[in-house]
Amino acid sequence: MTETIDHHLTTAREADPFPVKGMDAVVFAVGNAKQAAHFYSTAFGMKLVAYSGPENGSRETASYVLENGSARFVLTSVIKESTPWGRFLADHVAVHGDGVVDLSIEVPDARAAYEYAVEHGARGVTEPYELKDEYGTVVLAAIAAYGETRHTLVDRSGYDGPYLPGYVAAAPLVEPPAKRTFQAIDHCVGNVELGHMNEWVGFYNKVMGFTNMKEFVGDDIATEYSALMSKVVADGTRKVKFPINEPAIAKKKSQIDEYLEFYGSAGVQHIALATNDIVATVRAMRAAGVAFLDTPDSYYDTLGDWAGETRVPVETLRELKILVDRDEDGYLLQIFTKPVQDRPTVFFEMIERHGSMGFGKGNFKALFEAIEREQAKRGNL
C-alpha cells in the first residue's frame, strides 16, 4: 500500500508543471526578533537552530531560525536599515505590526519555477540568484503574492548547512521539550479584500499549477452576524495548501474585515501546525502561557452524535476546548490560538488528522462564534 501511495505521489510530482517539495519556511517581520524567538521557543516548544546578525556579518538585520520537525519559522527584525530589503521590513512592521512577509516554498529547481511563474503572470520580486558557503549552494528567487506577501522559491538540494549561507548554527534558547509540540506546517491561510478571492485562487491555478481542493461559501461559513468565503488551493501532492479567505456581506464586521482593518492590507491570517498528539500539545502550550479560543460546553453535549468516536474522550476534548470534524475520509481534531501579538491579526491552529484532509467545516459556526466573542471584547464586532 505504501509503495502504491509513493508511486502516485512521484507520478503527480513528475506531471506537475510547478513541482514543489513542501513549505521551506514561514518568514516573519517583527519588531524584536530576539524576544519573538524566545516566545516561540518557550510557548510553542520550537528549537533555535540558526542565527544571522551583527556578530556574523549581518549589519542590517537580525534573524532567528526556529524549527519543529519540518516546520521552520524565520523571525527577522531590522537593526539599522540600509538597503531596500531593510526598508521594506521596517516599513512592514510599522504599517502592519508583526506579520508574515514570506511563505517560502522548497522547489527542486528555483530557476525553472521562477521562469514558469513569471511566464504565467506572476510578478517577479527577485530573479534567481545563488548563495554559497562551505556547506554548498542554495538557489533562490521570489515572486509577489497577495498584499505584501511573497513566495521565495528555494532550491537547497545542493546545500546541507543549518539554514542558508550567511547563517550560523545556534544553540537553543531554552531546553526543548522532550516531546515535540508539532511536526509540520499543515496549511497557511491568506485573507484578501472583498471580491479578490477568486483572483488569487486563479493566480495559484495559473502561476503554480495548484488545483482547487475545497470551497466554502454561503451558509457553510456564516453565523448570525458575520460571514466569509474561502477556497483552498494545493499542489499536486497536497504538501502545500493555501486557503484564501475574503469577507462576505453580513450584519456586522467579520473576522476577515477586522484582520484587514488592523493589518492594513491582505496578508497571512493563520498558520496551521500538524501535531501527532493534540492533547499533549495543548496541555504544554497552555502551561507555557498560550491562550486558545474558548468553546462553550454545549458544543460537546451532542458532539458524539455527529462526530462519532475519536481517539480522545469527549471529556478530555471538553476540558481542553478541542474541536472535532469528520468527513467521508476520517476525522480531525483542531484548536485555534488567540492572536499572538497585540493587533488582532496573526494566530495559529493546531491540527491532528486521522484520514480527513478537510479544514473543519463542521466547526466553522462554533469557531466563528468564538472569534466573534473575542471581537466583541475588543469592540470590533
Image (spheres, rainbow, N blue to C red):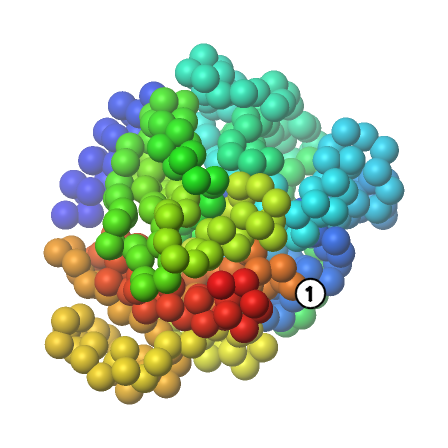
Against 303, residue 362 (above or below) is above
Q: Is 290 above or below relative to 263?
A: below
Q: Is residue 38 left or right of residue 234?
A: right
Task: Tell me if residue 179 can be seen.
Answer: no
Q: Is residue 103 visible?
A: yes
Q: How many marks?
A: 1
Residue at 68% from the left image edge and 52% from the top image edge: 97
| In the image, farthest residue toward the top | 119
Q: Nearer the viewer, residue 177 or 150?
A: 150
Residue drawn at x 27%, y 69% is 324
What kind of element bears circle 1? helix
Residue 267 lies left or right of residue 90; in this view the side is: left
Give the quadrant of residue 363: bottom left
Residue 180 % position (x, y): 48, 67
Question: Residue 32: x and y, percent?
Answer: 76, 56
Does 158 appear above or below 362?
above
Q: Which residue is mark 1?
A: 38
> How far from the left and from the top, in percent, is residue 114?
50, 20
* Image point (49%, 16%), residue name: 118
- Give 152 or 373, whichever is nearer the viewer: 373
- Residue at left offset 46%, top offset 51%: 256
Q: Amino acid at mark 1?
A: His
The furthest residue to the front: 251
Left or right placement of residue 198 versus residue 143 in this view: left
